[in-house]
Image (cartoon, rainbow, N blue to C red):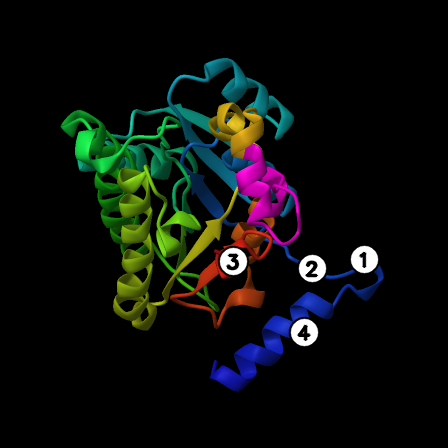
Amino acid sequence: MDSAAWTCYNFGMALSAQDSGLSLSLHGKVVLVTGGSRGIGAATVRLFRQAGARVVFSYHRAQLQAEELVRACGGETFCCALRQELTRPEDGQALVAAAAQVFGRLDCLVVNHGIWPAHDQPLATMPLQQWRTTLGVNLDSVFGLLQAGVEQMLRQPGPPEGARGHLVLIASTAAQRGEAFHADYAASKGALISLTKSLSSELAPQGILCNCVAPGWVRTEMSEAALGDPQTAERALRLIPLGRTAAPEEIAGPVVFLCTPWAGFVSGEVFNVNGGAVLVG
């Protein structure tokens, strides 16, 4: 099918059921979401399920939340939680291998997990262990995930039309403008943007699209302590033109969209979802 025919097919399929509205269906797709038990990850798992995909997600400690999310998403026939620490490349590789066995394939990989040390830490006094831990979780494990995920997507039979696979990395506003006293976090997330651009050029010719979503301040358990401090919250809101923080669902929406046929010509993009904050300050 040539490009013009594929475009007509895509949009024809999306508009075929006009009475039911716009279709963003991902029926038949299998998705892996890392760090999926809470916050942005959990919202992303729910939205993928609403779009018809089967979802595997990882968690580290939040077992009760993970089990509740599986039930809310239709049970293990449609959604599966895997406990996996993600601090090394080998951890990422192990998770992809386990996830691919659950539903037999992997079509979309959403790299959502990460840590953000909430305390301010000047670089001059940052403990080496903090630097290594942040980079281990936020970057080293991502290398293993991406390497194994790409290998799996290239090995399995591809769809008759459309992308062979989708990679979506969750970065941050801090990746683009830095974050004072959080150099470890900003550096790790900046690396994800560079990975996105590198992998886009490398993998798009093979049918795998790699994109990045860069949130600003989002109300999650990870940011709860910081946003609960009046001074920190005031500084954060001052830099957000919309004047508020995001809900997790507002990040999940762009993530899911990037895995649909409507984003079939999007590759190497950094999708800013921050209320305009990246343009301020």
Disc 2 versus disc 1: distance between alpha carbons? 8 Å
Q: Which residue is mark 4?
A: 12
Work out whether mark 2 precedes mark 3 in sequence or the reverse, and give the earlier one: 2
Q: Residue at x 21, y 30 (%)?
A: 126
Nearer the observer: mark 1 or 3; the answer is 3
Q: Could you tell me the amino acid type at mark 3?
A: Val
Q: How many numbered marks are there?
A: 4
Chain part drawn in magenta? 233-250
Q: Nearer the viewer, mark 4 or mark 3?
A: 3
**Distance (Cα) linking label 4 and label 1:** 14 Å
Please provide percent x and percent y for residue 195. Answer: 28, 57
Res. 220 in view: no
Give the class, few, some or many, for how many residues have Cα within 10 Å of label 1's Cα (few <14, many ≥20): few
Q: Name the kind of residue labelled 2 in the image.
A: Ser
Task: Provide the residue designation for mark 2.
Answer: 23
Residue 204 image label: none
Residue at the front extreme, as displayed: 231
**Residue located 32% across and 66% down the image:** 200
Residue contact between numbered discs 2 and 1, judged by CB atoms under 8 Å: yes
Identify the residue under disc 1.
20
